[in-house]
Image: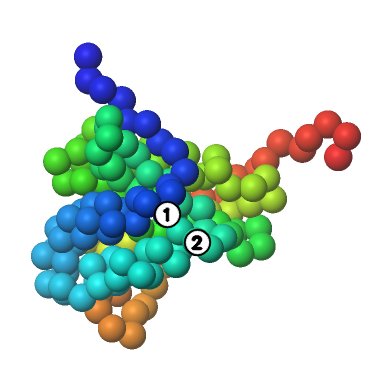
């Protein structure tokens, strides 16, 4: 039986591993778009530490003691901006990315009714994953530098709690 990745909130001590997995995961994107300066590749360890120290929700996936994935969500009113979904290249295609996406959505507060994210227009695997999870392509996401991206949105209706 294949070991199942455990998904949990990230801790400050995870910063280096998060950055390592993120860089490994985004190398394929850099090659696809001929751009070695994608923000997930140029982010510094101090920047990852700052994200972990702030209000952003950061989750990690572990197989045993090995960190194999991570994802972030920044809340702005009723919208959660999902970012940096990363899975170690040797673990891709095993459902970890989908589980991280589901987990970060579930970790967002109840007032969040909309999730947004973006990816490259030629990133077919990413687009398939996001569509399977209910995200809809809403348009281009022009960038000042680097390749243009596409925005995706998922709207959810949270059930009202009794007594509301």
Q: Is residue 135 above or below residue 41?
A: above
Query: Considering only order in the chain, which callout, 2 or 1, is on the residue closer to the N terminus?
Result: 1
Residue 112 rendering spot, x and y as whole percentages = 63, 52
When the figure is inspected, residue 50 is found, relative to residue 103, above or below; the finding is: below
| Relative to 164, 16 lies left or right | left
- Horizontal side of residue 156 vs 50, given as left or right: right
Whether residue 60 is situated above or below residue 48 in the rendered picture: above
Dot 2 surroundings within 10 Å: few (below 14), some, or many (20 or more)?
few
In the rendered image, the residue lying farthest to the top is 1
Residue 12 in the image: x percent, y percent? 42, 54
Find residue 114 and report its image quarter.
Answer: bottom right
Q: Which mark is residue 12?
A: 1
Q: Say whether marks 1 and 2 touch (CB < 8 Å).
A: yes
The residue closer to the viewer here, 17 or 21, is 17
Quadrant of residue 40 within the rendered picture: bottom left
Task: Indicate how the structure is coloured in the image.
Answer: rainbow
| Front residue (pair 32, 109) | 109
- The residue lying furthest to the right in this view is 163
Horizontal side, residue 129 vs residue 1: left or right: right
Measuring 26% from the left and 42% from the top, which residue is drawn there? Answer: 68
The span from disc 1 to disc 2 (Cα, nearest Å) is: 7 Å
Q: Residue at x 38, y 70 (%)?
A: 47
Residue at horizontal 27%, vertical 52%?
17
Q: Give the residue number, with chain letter if any, for mark 2.
A: 53
Residue 136 at x, y percent in the picture: 45, 53
Residue 29: tell me if it is visible.
yes
Which labelled disc corresponds to residue 45? none
């Amino acid at each position: 039986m294949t070991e199942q990745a455990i998904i949990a909130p990230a801790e400050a001590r995870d910063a280096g591993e998060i950055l390592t997995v993120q860089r490994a995961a985004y190398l394929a994107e850099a090659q696809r778009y001929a751009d070695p300066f994608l923000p997930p590749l140029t982010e510094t360890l101090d920047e990852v530490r700052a994200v972990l120290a702030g209000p952003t929700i950061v989750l990690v996936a572990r197989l045993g003691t090995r960190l194999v994935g991570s994802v972030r969500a920044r809340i702005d009113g009723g919208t959660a901006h999902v970012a940096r979904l990363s899975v170690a290249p040797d673990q891709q295609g095993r459902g970890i990315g989908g589980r991280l996406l589901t987990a970060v959505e579930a970790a967002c507060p109840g007032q969040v009714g909309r999730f947004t994210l973006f990816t490259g227009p030629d990133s077919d695997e990413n687009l398939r994953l996001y569509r399977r999870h209910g995200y809809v392509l809403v348009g281009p996401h022009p960038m000042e530098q680097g390749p243009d991206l596409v925005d995706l949105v998922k709207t959810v209706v949270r059930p009202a709690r009794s007594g509301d």
